[in-house]
Image: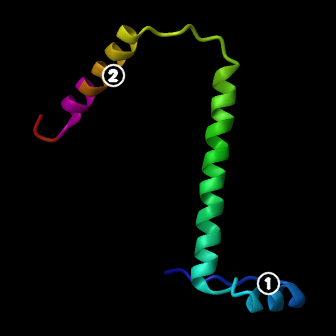
Amino acid sequence: MTTLTIDLPDPLAKEANDAGLLEPRAIEAMLRENLRRNALNDLFTAADKLAITDFPSMTMDEIQAEVNAVRTQRQQRAPGA
């Protein structure tokens, strides 16, 4: 566990405390939600960047060949392989 100390304006601290937002579970929930939202935003940003690139489309056979190649590499790196 990590202990955090934060400085807040007194009125905000009182309001947040009265609302139960300074409880460890509430802070954890807010942090997890913000991390999830940031990850989702990053995913959409990456998707937008990918959408504007000019990569040629792959056929299902090409996709399957790539999947097979990755699987083969993983099997070769697996312990005891």
Q: Position of residue 41 (x, y in %)?
A: 67, 45
The answer to whether residue 77 is magenta is yes
Q: Is residue 7 left or right of residue 36?
A: right
Judged from this view, the residue extending furthest toward the front is 19
Q: Quadrant of the C terminus?
A: top left
| SS assignment for the magenta stretch, majority | helix
Q: Quadrant of residue 67?
A: top left
Relative vertical location of residue 61 with respect to residue 19 in this rendering, above or below: above
Render colour scheme: rainbow
Q: Which mark is residue 7?
A: 1
- Taking depth in this image into account, of 49 and 26 the one nearest to the observer is 26
Measured as percent of width and height from the top left, residue 77 is found at 22, 34
Give the image quarter of residue 33.
Answer: bottom right
Numbered disc in front, either 2 or 1? 2
The stretch in magenta equals 72-78
The dot on residue 67 is 2
Residue 52 % position (x, y): 70, 19
Above/below status of 19 relative to 68: below
Instruction: Say if 77 sits above or below 26 in the image.
Output: above
How many numbered markers are drawn? 2
Q: Secondary structure at mark 1?
A: loop
Could you say which quadrant of the image residue 22 lies in?
Answer: bottom right
> Which residue lies at the image location 53% right of the left edge and 9% below the top edge?
57
Question: Is 36 situated above or below 58?
Answer: below
Residue at (31, 25) in percent of width and height: 70
Crowd class of label 1 (few under 14; some 14 to 19; many from 20; radius 10 Å): few
Q: Earlier in the sequence, mark 2 or mark 1?
A: 1
Q: Position of residue 1 (x, y in %)?
A: 49, 81
Point out which mark residue 51 bears. Answer: none
Q: Gap in Å between the C-alphas at discs 2 and 1?
A: 50 Å
